[in-house]
Image: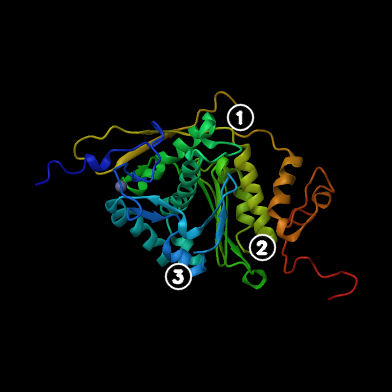
Amino acid sequence: MSEIQPRAALTLYDPFEGMQFSMHRCFLCGNPTTPPQDTVPVFADWLMTRYGLQERQIKLLDMSIVQYQHLRIACCPTCRTQHVEPLEARVEAAAQEGIRGFRQLDDQTLFLWLGKMFYGVLVTELLTEMDPLAKPQYPLAENAQLLRRFQAFYQPLQALRVPMEYEDFVPGSLFILEADPAQDEMPFEYDDDLSTIAFSIKLDETVLVACLVDNGIIRQAMGRVYQDAYRPLHPVQVAEFKARVYYAAYLLNVVPDYYPRPVKPGDVEVIMDTLIDDVTGDIFNPWENSAYAQSLLEMWKRWQIPLEEIVRNPAEPLTFLYDAGGQPRVIKHYPEANKAGNK
Ligand SMILES: [Zn+2]
């Protein structure tokens, strides 16, 4: 019988302790790995195949360019075959069903799947920074507050390898939006804000937007907007929703602490507790319309909406999600047909 069994499997790992990031260490368990064979793609093969991403380019913080297919992180064979590949297979199967499939996935699966991609990009950035030739403008690894946030995020992410139950919390805010296929011409889109751990990926009509380290606070704060957005949205409305999430993540003033309970003999999973220390200040910094407008400007770049138009009413920046009476607005076309001439 297996006396020696689960203890080791329930041991957590912290790559931030001593900054152990490397292509020679599994990102999930820390065991030694040999590149290039012991790696997994940050964006799964099925995703790259489905959306033709292999040669598509992504710009890193130091302005260097990488192709999606070259974004890989170190992963030992055990973690790859037992944890990463099964997760990808689950999400791939759900993705076959479109947005309905995504809505049926449980919160933990979605968090882990988005978290794995985010973490892969983050580690790529950190490793690029360590390259003596790189000269990043804002080195992530030198910002203690940022590192603390990344380190916190990594705790619940370990559920990807270690059986783990989050005791009474969700680690992040997840939103599943539906882009109106009639108005939509972007099958795939990806963006992130590393410093706030905000993340968004679009797969056909499904748009996943998340802040991965807020214990669901943003989702709570945006409860009504999310409810009102539970319908096919014009892409310009999706972009506005993203601007709200990204800006809220920027205002978030707390970092959750996570506490794994000590593992006892016979335990089959780690129970993770959390605490948000908000004694020292507010959960959110004050909302400022001028800063929010910048976030809108960025997200609406595709439509080239000028800042003057966004802040025409400084007290209420432009919105496409709501009409003047505060009711959810339906947008079939943007820019809207010329009122004078067209029907
Ligand atoms: Zn491993």
- Rounded to the nearest angstrom, the CA distance separating label 3 from label 2 is 22 Å
**Colour scheme:** rainbow
Asked if disc 3 and disc 2 are in contact, CB closer than 8 Å, the reply is: no
Q: CA distance from mark 3 to mark 1?
A: 42 Å
Note whether ligand 1 is within 8 Å of mark 2: no
The disc, 2 or 1, on the residue closer to the chain's N-terminal end is 2
Kindly state the secondary structure of the residue where label 3 is placed: helix
Which label sits in the foreground, 2 or 1? 2
> Which of labels 3 and 1 is toward the front?
3
Question: Does the rendering let one see residue 330?
Answer: yes
Specify whether 1 is left or right of 226.
left
Residue at image point 54% right, 28% down: 278
Measured from the top left, where is residue 290 in percent x and y? 76, 41
- What mark, if any, has residue 189 been given in the picture? none
If you read the primary sequence from the N terminus, does the residue marked by circle 3 or circle 1 appear first?
3
Rendered image: mark on residue 235: 2
Of residues 53 and 23, which is closer to you in this image? 23
Identify which residue is drawn at 46% across, 68% down.
49
Q: How many numbered tags mark residues here?
A: 3
Q: Amino acid at mark 1?
A: Asp
Q: Which residue is mark 1?
A: 282
Disc 2 to disc 1, how far (Cα)? 33 Å
Q: Residues within 10 Å of mark 3 (few under 14, many from 20)?
A: few
Q: Is residue 146 above or below residue 100?
A: above
Q: Position of residue 16 (x, y in %)?
A: 41, 34
The label number, if any, that marks residue 96 in the structure image: 3
Please state the horizontal and vertical placement of residue 269, each as a whole percent of the image: 28, 43
The percent coordinates of residue 91 (x first, y second) are 42, 61
Provide the secondary structure element on which disc 2 rests: helix
Please, is residue 215 above or below residue 232 in the view? above
Residue most toward the bottom? 343
